[in-house]
Amino acid sequence: MTQVQKRALAIHDISCFGRCSLTVALPILSAAGIETAVIPTAVLSTHTGGFTGFTYRDLTEDILPIAKHWRELGLGFDAVYTGFLGSFEQIGIVAEVFELWRKEGALIVVDPVMADDGKLYSIFPADFPSGMRKLCALADVIVPNLTEAALLLDIPYNPGPFTRDEIEMMLRRLAALGPGRVVLTGVTRTEGPDMLGAASYDARAGEVAFSGLNRVDPMYHGTGDVFASVLTAALLHGKPLAIASEAAVRFTVDSLKRTKLAGTDNRFGVNFEDGLAGLRGLIGLPV
């Protein structure tokens, strides 16, 4: 019996160079056998990390008309997955998009892209995290990094390493914002400070899990999008949160290793492409 293909909606920007956002989400979800529709929030010549003079075209006015046209066509989605949003206005609009498909059981995944390395991205106003906090409250799954988690919880940024109790406290506080499942990325533990990975919490099951591999330096742009896209793909295929997080860690670290070995400029993103052929097997699908 042929299995019905899953369909996802990815709402991210298009950074035309730099391997992040939609240029990462679309190929990863597609390689996992998921039909993927996209709504771009903006088009940039490059991402904003480390590049100057980039072009930026805002597409706020197009988001809701695209979504409503799809509703008129009777299109359905198994997941709505969001990343970079360029303004408070877009946060409110995306919340409306969620409601178009939530009643049909679509999985809502929010990657609250807004900060890294202890700092809010310079293009965002200081009160942007309050808007993102409201969007996360509407999600089923959120995937913040440590900086984004601190901003969502309005606590000082701490790069770690953390004890298990400290991580669990953060996960539970993030889940209390509204999402039933949380994956915190960029986590190091006091029990293994050279290991870098993710911590997950499924509030319904009361389960906390950790996954980590040897740290790969330096920092490369786009790894959060790689991680969240693999996570979303695995969840759509019915994998438990801890298993999906483990697969996302392994895929991301393998991509980092290839990129470091090649000596690629860290602004250019990571070589995830060479791992796509093995993605289905990694998340436990028939190959």
Image (tube, rainbow, N blue to C red):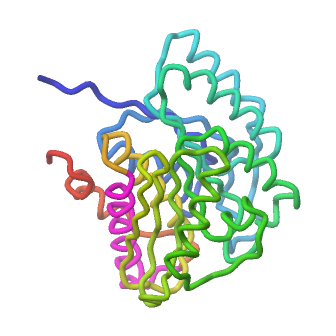
Question: Does residue 223 sit above or below 259 in this rendering?
Answer: above
**Residue at image x 61%, y 21%?**
100
Place residue 266 in its image quadrant: bottom right
Depth check: 57 or 98 in front? Answer: 98
Number of numbered discs on residues: 0
**Residue at image x 59%, y 47%?**
110
Depth check: 279 or 55 in front? Answer: 279
Place residue 137 in its image quadrant: top right
Depth check: 141 or 44 in front? Answer: 141
**Residue at image x 39%, y 45%?**
29
Depth check: 45 or 104 in front? Answer: 104
The rendered magenta stretch, by its main secondary structure, is classed as: helix
Location of residue 211 in the rendering, given as x and y in whole percent from the top left corner: 38, 71
The magenta span reads 241-265
Q: Left or right: where does residue 287 sit relative to residue 61?
A: left
Asked if residue 53 is among those painted magenta in the image, a careful observer would answer: no
Q: Left or right: where does residue 48 sit relative to residue 210?
A: right
